[in-house]
Image (cartoon, rainbow, N blue to C red):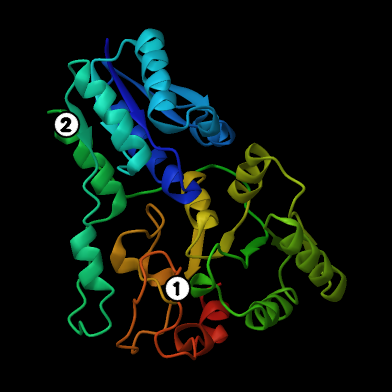
């Protein structure tokens, strides 16, 4: 059996986006086995995929050139791969790539399209064009190895009784996050007719969401209470998830749940819409020429007023539910 050693260490949402690609690749190429090397705590994302081996590591144990050389030796000895796939292409993985190249491997790596993305987020560029989805960029790595892969761009259909609405109000960066007072109002309105479940992590988020639970009837905060496996199961049971452009959107895709996604300074054109999610479920301010001004939402507002988030009409979210 042909074995591919692939690695992608972060970010959480980007690692989650590899899952449907691996799933469909292995369905279409049953003679292949994939080893995915990633952070220990991402293991549950990959559970149940035939012919996929998850190798969890603590990246802090493999720092610097010597540390990554040690990791490379460990992976070669344990898995004896036929192909190497770098699905991350950052300094850490470039260093690991060099180890494999010196050991006679050709490394196939993701083409992130950095120049295209820089052009997309140029606030003076008024001709915004949709870029290749990240899932297709991952798929291209395997196509370059001469494997066949046609992505369906459909999330799995689960035969579950679905009830309740999930809301994940937070994101890593301000440019991705609907102002909390707006999200609170969305919750207050929807909770009149639906059970609402809050998702989040981190001490501050847990505190805020517990407070919301106290203020709004028919809501329950799950923040800080679930393992990743439990969170995936709960999202699978929801009728719909409401999420920012963040990891929960991708988790919804993995478990076959429709997601209404909210976008601010980032934009689906950059290729990060949840796998199989409908463009009709995107909530954004469309007529701001400065959007997107960031690929990851980590830049300060060019205008200073965060109009891309402040001007979102929450009625759009409610109507989509």
Q: Can residue 73 be seen in this view?
A: yes
Residue 255 position in % (x across, y down): 52, 44
- Side of 240 where 111 appears, left or right: left
Mark 2 Cα shell of 10 Å, populated few (<14), some (14-19), many (≥20):
few
Q: How far apart are marks 2 and 1 (CA)?
A: 33 Å
Residue 313 position in % (x across, y down): 52, 88
Q: Considering depth in this image, is 72 or 321 the residue closer to the camera?
A: 72
Residue 240 position in % (x across, y down): 57, 61
The residue at which mark 1 appears reads as 263
Element assignment for label 1? loop
Mark 1 Cα shell of 10 Å, populated few (<14), some (14-19), many (≥20):
many
Element assignment for label 2? loop
The residue at which mark 2 appears reads as 148
Q: Can residue 257 be seen in this view?
A: no
Residue in the image at 19% along x and 72% along y: 129
Residue 292, compared with residue 253, is above or below; it is below
Quadrant of the frame with the C terminus: bottom right
Quadrant of the frame with the N terminus: top left
Residue 64 position in % (x across, y down): 42, 32
Residue in the image at 23% along x and 37% along y: 109
Residue in the image at 62% along x and 54% along y: 238
The answer to which image quadrant residue 147 occupies is top left
Q: Nearer the viewer, mark 2 or mark 1?
A: 1
The answer to which image quadrant residue 99 occupies is top left
Q: Which of marks 2 and 1 is nearer the N terminus?
A: 2
Q: Considering depth in this image, is 222 or 246 the residue closer to the camera?
A: 246
């Amino acid at each position: 059996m042909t074995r591919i050693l692939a690695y992608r260490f972060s970010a959480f949402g980007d690692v989650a986006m590899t899952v449907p690609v691996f799933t469909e690749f292995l369905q279409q190429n049953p003679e292949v086995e994939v080893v995915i090397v990633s952070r220990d705590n991402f293991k549950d994302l990959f559970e149940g995929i035939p012919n996929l081996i998850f190798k969890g590591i603590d990246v802090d144990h493999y720092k610097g050139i010597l540390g990554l050389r040690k990791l490379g030796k460990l992976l070669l000895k344990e898995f004896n791969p036929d192909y190497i796939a770098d699905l991350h292409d950052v300094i850490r993985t470039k260093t690991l790539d060099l180890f494999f190249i010196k050991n006679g491997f050709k490394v196939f790596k993701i083409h992130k399209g950095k120049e295209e993305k820089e052009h997309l987020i140029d606030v003076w560029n008024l001709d915004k064009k949709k870029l290749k989805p990240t899932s297709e960029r991952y798929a291209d790595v395997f196509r370059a190895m001469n494997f066949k892969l046609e992505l369906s761009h459909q999330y799995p259909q689960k035969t579950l009784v679905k009830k309740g609405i999930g809301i994940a109000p937070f994101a890593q960066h301000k440019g991705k996050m609907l102002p909390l007072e707006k999200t609170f109002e969305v919750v207050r309105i929807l909770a009149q007719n639906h059970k609402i479940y809050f998702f989040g992590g981190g001490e501050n988020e847990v505190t805020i969401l517990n407070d919301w639970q106290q203020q709004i009837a028919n809501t329950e905060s799950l923040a800080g209470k679930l393992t990743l496996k439990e969170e995936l199961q709960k999202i699978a049971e929801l009728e719909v998830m409401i999420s920012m452009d963040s990891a929960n959107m991708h988790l919804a895709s993995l478990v076959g749940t429709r997601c209404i996604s909210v976008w601010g300074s980032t934009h689906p054109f950059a290729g990060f819409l949840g796998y199989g999610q409908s463009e009709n479920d995107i909530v954004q301010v469309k007529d701001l020429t400065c959007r997107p001004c960031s690929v990851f939402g980590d830049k300060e507002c060019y205008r200073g007023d965060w109009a891309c988030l402040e001007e979102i009409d929450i009625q759009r979210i409610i109507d989509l539910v």
